[in-house]
Amino acid sequence: MSSLGANIMKNVSTDNIRNLCLVGKAGSGKTSLVEAMLFAAGATNRLGKIEEGNTVCDYQDDEKERRMSINMKLASFEHAGKKVNLMDTPGCADLWGEAVSALTVSDTVVLVLGVDSPIDVSTEEVWEPVVESKKPALIFVNKTDKPDINLDEFLKAMDAKLEVKTCPLVIPGDEAGTSVNLLSLKKTDASGKESDLGDADARIESLRERLIDAVAAHDDKLIEKYLGGEKLTAEEMTDAFKKGFKEGKIIPVVCGSASTCTGVRAFLNVIAEYFPAPDISKDQNKGLFSGIIFKTMSEPGMGQMNFVRACSGKLNTGLDVYNITRQKRERIGPVCFMQGRTRVDAGSLEAGDIGVLVKLKETRTGDSLVDEKLGKDKVPGIPTIDFPPCLMDMAVYTKSKGEEEKVGNALSTMTMEDPTLKFQYNGETREMILSGVGNLQLEIARSRIKARYGIDVELRPPKVPYKETIRGKAEGQGKHKKQTGGRGQYGDCWIRIEPLERGKGFEFVDDVFGGAIPKNFIPSIEKGIKESMERGIISGHPVVDVKITVYDGSYHDVDSSDQAFKIAGSLALKKVFPEARPCLIEPIMNLEVIIPEDYTGAVMGDLNSRRGRIMGIDRFKKRQVVKAQVPLGEMTSYAPDLRSMAKGSGKFKLQFSHYEELPSNIAKNLIEAYQKTRSPEE
């Protein structure tokens, strides 16, 4: 057998490239199928197993520990004169961004289903974007060697649940380890040897009729010939199948078992013979290189790697390119193929091929690269990656003081690798906020910070950015007088406070007449008021939507200073604010929840328990869209809660709407908790 990486073709023409990605829910067997394909193609000399932690694609420590794929991985190999670029994607919904990248640059999508698992809502969630991509799709039904399974019933349920009409292409043979290609009528045994099927039994004849129906249905000439009782030639069948498959009109099914390699060699033949090559216009961009970076990884000992698809032209080591996205120039360093973590020097990539670039300085996921000769404008033919939005926020706290900067640098690197992670500092709550698609994704990020950088961090629900304001008017004096020997401190001001319309912020008015306070001290009063507003008066949250007028005061020719009047302004606000009927206000969010109709009642009941207001219900495709307004403070755990409520089938969008007054019982608890933390002099 060939060693890892030894049988990857170089300088392969576009016509001989096959790009595909595997998608499917967790546990369907995608990574095991990759192992079987690499082994069957001679790219590896042993069949790795997830439980033993020795698979080609799940090589990272946390993947081995969790026994699940976390990052999209690329494995390239040769079979039957074709170079296959195979992308393995995670099955967890929290990590769907990895699959989005692979979907964008693949030419064909393979949905992997385990015959021992029902077609549930999580499978439908994976299938929906495959349909929306409008790319050729094949379904690999895995684990068909399991005892006591009814394959026919599974296929019927699959068509019904996914609302498609599939056609069988490769099915299990009568003998253990064999498989039958219904299109070519070839039988493949356990060793990979292919032979003519010979006489077909009733089961095979019935399934082949179903395949012929599906193939002929999309070709007017063939359907006429078929209905007329004429026999379709093998060439006619193959050409019509390829055309229908490429156009997405035929969804073939391959049955097999990754654990025993049953059907896998026949599947490799299907890829080589029937999967479409990259669709590259011959005159596109005058033959000059253009491409997209669809994944960035940075690993200890391996450096930064940028996964690239060449959309046109040829990419060579040493080529000067322009990053259109970042408006930066780059020089291409080593160009490689990948098999999991193993890099194999390629030297160049032809149009349509996929590989990895190392030693790029400025380039990141989603960036478009073009040959410098093409200029700086956007080039047609380069796809864009539409990543899923962040749905969950967590505050990041270090367990040791002084490590905040290190954590910030670590998170910046991780968000570069995964665009569905966002990191920012919230000045209002003074917290580092890490945002992602779901709880598992954020927990993986926390674990990787410790493993890679040796920093222990804790994830907590973020503080809600409450604000303080008033409902009434008040006025009073702030006077700062201090004599400590020598020159003293003296500042005296009278202010009036009144509410502003919600969202207006802050207005300061100087209404002092007759020189009661010299004009040069007025800005100091305003500064003292603003600083106190930022710190908060009753609950430690910023004060907003108030108008403050300074209208009187006094000064001392010697002892008055900017600092004294700044303190006086602060004291005045602290005195009058509690007398102006203060209250807390909270952020209210616009929420849209997209769910199957069966879960509408549960979702609406849950939103009511979160102090939400239902604004309406619309319909989107087969689903319901519940629109509501909900306080942000009630949405901390909504992503996992919705996933649990709707059994993985719920999606939601959250957007800031406005601020409203916080119910008095909740506000009282916040105020009392804050007051207990204050020192007597405050």
Image (cartoon, helix red, strand yellow):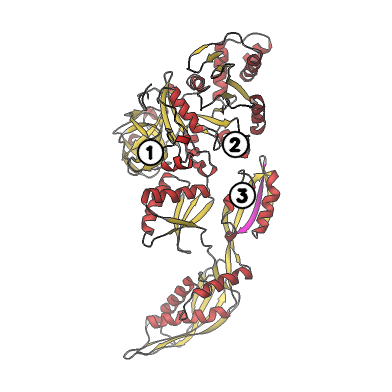
Q: Nearer the viewer, mark 1 or mark 3?
A: 3
Q: Which residue is mark 1?
A: 306
* Side of 246 relative to 569 (left or right): right
Measured as percent of width and height from the top left, residue 480 is found at 43, 86
Other-residue count near label 2 (Cα within 10 Å), few / some / many at <14 / 14–19 / ≥20: many
Q: How many marks?
A: 3
Residue 653 in sight in this render: no
Quarter of the image for residue 658 reads bottom right
Q: Which residue is mark 2?
A: 123
The majority secondary structure of the magenta stretch comes to strand
Residue 676 in sight in this render: yes
Other-residue count near label 1 (Cα within 10 Å), few / some / many at <14 / 14–19 / ≥20: many
- Does the magenta run of residues contain 519? no
Residue drawn at the location 40% of the way across and 41% of the way down: 296
Quarter of the image for residue 361 reads top left
Proximity of marks 1 and 2: CB atoms separated by less than 8 Å = no
- What label does residue 642 carry, if any? 3
Residue drawn at the location 41% of the way across and 82% of the way down: 565
Query: In the rendered structure, which segment of residues is drawn in magenta?
Result: 623-631
* Side of 365 relative to 622 (left or right): left
Q: Nearer the viewer, mark 1 or mark 2?
A: 2
Which circle's residue, 3 or 2, is located before the other in the chain?
Answer: 2
* Side of 676 relative to 365 (left or right): right
Which amino acid, mark 1? Answer: Asn
Q: Is residue 299 above or below residue 46?
A: below
670 or 248: nearer the eye? 670
Q: Is residue 30 above or below residue 667?
A: above
